[in-house]
Image (cartoon, helix red, strand yellow):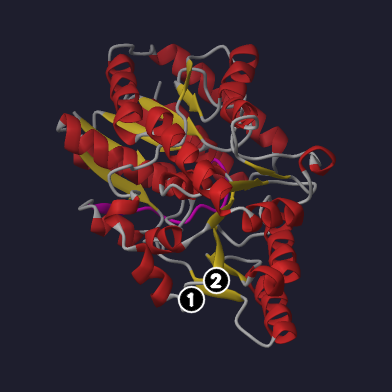
Amino acid sequence: MKVLVFPHHLEIGGSQVNAVDLAAAVRDIYGHEVVFFATPGPGEALLESRGFRLIAAPRPRSSPSPSVARALRQAVRREGADIVHAWDWPQCIDAFFGAQLAGGVPIVGSIMSMVVPTFVPRSIPLTFGTPELLDEAKRRRRGKVSLLEPPVNTYLDDPSAIDGAASRAAFGVEDNDILVVGVSRLVGWMKLEGLLATLDAVGALADQYRLRLLLVGEGSAEGQLRARASEINDRHQRQVVTMPGALVDPRPAYAAADVVVGMGGSILRGMAFGKPAVVLGENGFACTFDEESSKTFLHKGFFGTEDVSARVGTLREQLEKLCANPGRRDALGAYSSRIIRERFALPVLAASVEQLYRETLNERVGRARLIGEGVKVLGRRAAAVALPNRAKAALRRVLKRSR
C-alpha cells in the first residue's frame, strides 16, 4: 500500500519524530511506500536522513484550513495514496476534508497530546498515547480507538551506537562532571516551568557535585532560559549550563548523560540509552522513574500535573540523591533500558500500526455518513473558534462537491 503521512509543521518535536520512526519501520519491515506531506521546517533534515520524500504543505491560518485541505487533496490524487496517517487533531480534520470526504481515501489519526478531541469525526480511527487516555477516549468517543504509545527506535537509540565518552568530550564535559541532559522544545506551554526548575536545581548543586546541565532544543522560551543559564554560569564562574540549540540527532547528548530529565518521548529516548530518568511536568511535578513510580507513568504517561514533592522530594532533592549514589544511577539506568525494550520498542508498535492500516482499508465509510460528519465538524469548530467567513465558505464548497 502507499501511505501518506501528515504530521504537523516539521519542527524538531516528539510527535514528528514518532511519525518518522513509525513510517520508516512500516516501510522497511512491511515494504509499504511512504511519502510525507507537511509544512517545511527544521525536521526536513530528519526526513532526508531516513530517505523520505516531502510534499510541502502550506502553513495553516485556521483549523480547519481550506488551503491545507486543498493541497492535501491534490497530493493524495497525484500520489495515488491508499491511506493517510494524520498526526494530532488539526491534521485529522484537514485530512478529513481534503482526503476522506473529497477523495474517499481513509484516514488513521494519532493523538499524542494529553487530550481527547471529541470533535474529530468518529469515522477516523484514533490512537492515543497512554492507557489512561485510551480509557477516557472509550468513554467519550463513539469511534474506533486504540493504544499507540510513543515508539522508541531501539536500533538507533542504543548506547552501543554512540560513543558516550567521545560525546562528553565534544560537549566539553570532563570525566568527573555529573551531566544532566534535557532534550526539549523550549516553549512556555507545558515545558517552561520544569525547565526553569531544572536550571535552578542544577545551579544549586553545581559546586557540591560538580554538576552540569546540557539543555538541547529551541523555541519561543529560549531567550528566557538562556538568560537564566547565563546567571548561573556567571555566579559559578564556569560553564554549568550549556545550551547548544536544537540537534537533528540528539543521540550524542543522551549518550553523554549521567541523568536525563524531561517528559514524553524525549525522556523515553534517554531511558533507551540506559540512563536514570527524572520525569517533569507542571505545578512543580518532578519524579524519578523507578520500580514504584513506573506503575503510574506506564498508565498515565511520562508527564505529571500535581505537586508530588511531599512524597518523593523536590527536583533538587531527587537530583542530589542520584548524584550521591552512582550505584543507584546504574541500577535505575538498567531498569529504564529494560522497560523501553519490552514495551516501547519500534518493531512492536509498528506491527500494530500496520495492522490498523489494513483494518481501516477494509472498513469503508458511506458518503452520507461522511457528509453528516463534515457538517458537524464545521458547526463545532465554528462555535469554538471564529473562523473567517472565507474559510467557512471554502469548506462548505468541499462538502458540496462531495455530495
Mark 1 in CB contact with mark 2 (< 8 angstroms):
yes
| Residue position marked by numbered label 2 in the rendering | 177
* Prevailing SS of the magenta stretch: loop
Q: Which mark is residue 56?
A: none
Q: Is residue 213 visible?
A: yes
Instruction: Answer whether residue 195 is magenta in the image.
Output: no
Q: Is residue 330 left or right of residue 401?
A: right
Q: Position of residue 343 (x, y in %)?
A: 42, 28
Residue 96 in view in this figure: no
Left/right of residue 290 with respect to residue 76 in the rendered view = right
Residue at the far right in the pictured view: 310
Residue placed most toward the observer, 334 or 384: 334
Residue 67 % position (x, y): 44, 49
Query: Residue flagged by tag 1: what amino acid is it?
Result: Glu
Residue 242 occupies quadrant: bottom right
State the residue in front, 254 or 47: 254
Q: Position of residue 128 (x, y in %)?
A: 52, 27
Q: Which residues are magenta?
A: 53-65
